[in-house]
Amino acid sequence: MEEINRLEAIAVPVAARVGDLVASIDTPGLILDLDAFEENLRKMQALAERHGVALRPHAKAHKCPDIALRQIALGAQGICCEKVSEAIPFLAAGVRDIHIGTEVVGAGKLALLARMAGKARFTVCADHPRAVEALSAAMAEHRASIGVFIEVDIGQKRCGVQSHDEAVALARLILRLPNLEFSGIQARHGGLKLAASLRRREKSSLKAARLIRRYLRALEQADIECPRVTGGATESAVFDVANGAYTEIQAGAYAFMDADYARIDWGEALSFRHSLFLLATVTSVPEADRAVLDAGVKSMGAASSPAFAENPGWRCVAVTGEHSVLRARNPRALPPLGAQIRLVPGQCGLTFNLHDAVIAVRGQHVEAIWPISARGLSR
Amino acid sequence: MEEINRLEAIAVPVAARVGDLVASIDTPGLILDLDAFEENLRKMQALAERHGVALRPHAKAHKCPDIALRQIALGAQGICCEKVSEAIPFLAAGVRDIHIGTEVVGAGKLALLARMAGKARFTVCADHPRAVEALSAAMAEHRASIGVFIEVDIGQKRCGVQSHDEAVALARLILRLPNLEFSGIQARHGGLKLAASLRRREKSSLKAARLIRRYLRALEQADIECPRVTGGATESAVFDVANGAYTEIQAGAYAFMDADYARIDWGEALSFRHSLFLLATVTSVPEADRAVLDAGVKSMGAASSPAFAENPGWRCVAVTGEHSVLRARNPRALPPLGAQIRLVPGQCGLTFNLHDAVIAVRGQHVEAIWPISARGLSR
């Protein structure tokens, strides 16, 4: 008996079960406050509908099919993924309209994309003729077809064609090659997140619209119809829906409102509630004004500081791999050893990518546990 | 047939198989150059043995049992883990001496630790009497026993007792309570990694030794024998083995030599080779001096810049969730669309924590694929 006990493998205990009290969740534990989450989803969907623009939530922000299905049930057009493999669990869960918002290069990835495009409506980005040719060949081989967006660089300085001439030439190629459909253009402002002022985000959105319209005019002059324009982001959504350039908005973080997003100015126009938290436990109180929590970069994913949901007088003074150090301005407000603390992660997309599941809670109870099935799918 | 094809689920393709050429690995792919890795392991083990100090590699750096078993086969004392759940796959793989290098709080975690302590030699840290009492009670309940290190704060400003009196009181408590054994003290300098100069790391190690000796003297004056002193790190190892204070050295990154470590000055004393790389593919070449790679923070884990193994004239100018942007000083040196690039991750521990497996390569071929079984085990 003793011997059997010694040999029996120890499994990783579950962090929580449906019906459990939130207070009993093992830490660090990723929780989603469903009331705040649902309010955020409804608010962004209503904004898009008010302006007659489609909402295509970016699944890179959560990597969780249960979340995508709720976004779609409320009226979202489909989803956006950042990588080909990332789309696999969403397709398996029944999502039928998936845009891969990046360039795809490599025979293996193109074959995978073609197999998926045989099962649902897929679109993808391209910014190079060789990539478009390879895409067409892969689709033909798998008897599939795919919609292609030309990515245009309107200031993000990452991918995307740099000129109207390149865009027109690429559109002609897409229209000429078999098994491809020209879907339109993808244009992301990029780098806006840290622009704190609402005014500056408005200017960036208006500038994006001007640059997009010039691309549309160039295509029009070449007699090429541009069916859709995809892009935009949470931080500029309120302007992107209204600037007249986008037919669909890609936004992801709005559903969660992480600490980085919460630090920027939202004005009266549109605001979201924190819905994503990392539960942590105080494991050390070495000094009167200092407490150490059992959650760090390995469960939060960003070196940018988390915020504390419960007490604005707490500051996070250090985040290491598995710990965060909290300082209390008022030592009497220091949380005691064993206290459970809610951290607001710095960047939700990085946080989801570290966890196998998110614990969906309503009030003080666990309502569901949703697998983060696309976690780690970066290929 | 058509219908069956439509319903058949698509699985995530494997990144590589044993025997494959490295050039055929799907990207982003985490690879370990076995020649460099084995040389690093031998070098650190030899250093420790030369000074009669035990080497206890920190498994938080890799989370991979196959790596730990190789460290132990070469003479390492056992391993260090940063969290309780992290130890589960190492125990299952046959590691029989595991130190949990942090404070553990919470009934569930203590029960798990007690169950594991019934199967192998475990030690853990404590810095608070209530935590020591809870530890003793949990061990008694599971009829297990555990060794306890008192963590002392010698400048890390995270966990640890702040005074000799606290340390002596805690040691007495550990010696008095059932199912506990007093193992000694854990003392980490902390915050040294960014100290570029070798001279400053030497000073820090010597200062650590002075502070540790004062703790040892306080314990001795209280008639308490201190069996072991654990701590140290890769960046100060060459001094830590020689400063006379440590009986065992915790080091992790030495096996991989990530980009952050490579940026500091190593002098003649001890140096390691890059063994860990993230393979990426060029997916866009939008301008003559700019290429975009398909690997970002979600597969590297740190916002600190990766280094490029192949070309020192390449600079990484931006890292986003799934992409990195490379600029070439000389446009003729820009890698072409589809080229495979080796990135040296900024911080190896964060990188391993994002991948399910590491692809072990020798020369141009895949030799083995090792599961990173403790990935995500932050509880």
Image (spheres, coloured by chain):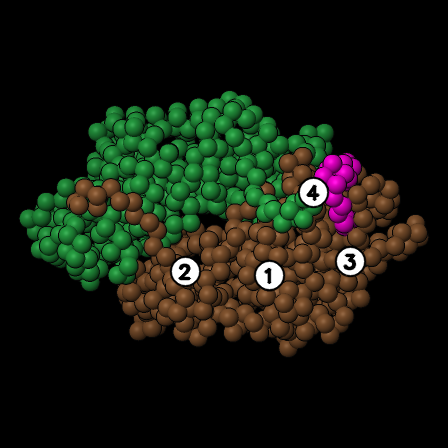
Chain colours: A brown, B green
Q: Residue at x 64, y 61 (%)?
A: A57
> Which residue is under mark 3?
A229
Question: What is the three-letter code of the residue carrying label 1?
Answer: Ala
| Comes first in the chain, label 1 or label 4 | 1
The chain carrying label 3 is A
The chain carrying label 2 is A
| Comes first in the chain, label 2 or label 1 | 2
Which labelled disc corresponds to residue A29?
2
**Relative to residue B361, is residue A45 drawn left or right?**
right
Q: Residue at x 39, y 69 (%)?
A: A19
Q: Is residue B76 positioned above or below A264 on the image? A: above
Please state which of the two labelled residues, at mark 3 or mark 4, is closer to the viewer. Answer: 4
Question: Which of A85/B273 is in front?
Answer: A85
The quarter of the displayed image where residue B203 is located: top left
In space, the residues marked 3 and 4 are separated at their CA atoms by 23 Å
Which labelled disc corresponds to residue A247?
none
Which labelled disc corresponds to residue A114?
4
Q: Are marks 2 and 3 on the same chain?
A: yes
> Which residue is under mark 1?
A68
Please state which of the two labelled residues, at mark 4 or mark 2, is closer to the viewer. Answer: 4
In space, the residues marked 2 and 3 are separated at their CA atoms by 38 Å
**Residue B13 position within the rendered picture, expressed as x and y whole percent measured from the top left:** 57, 39
Label tally: 4
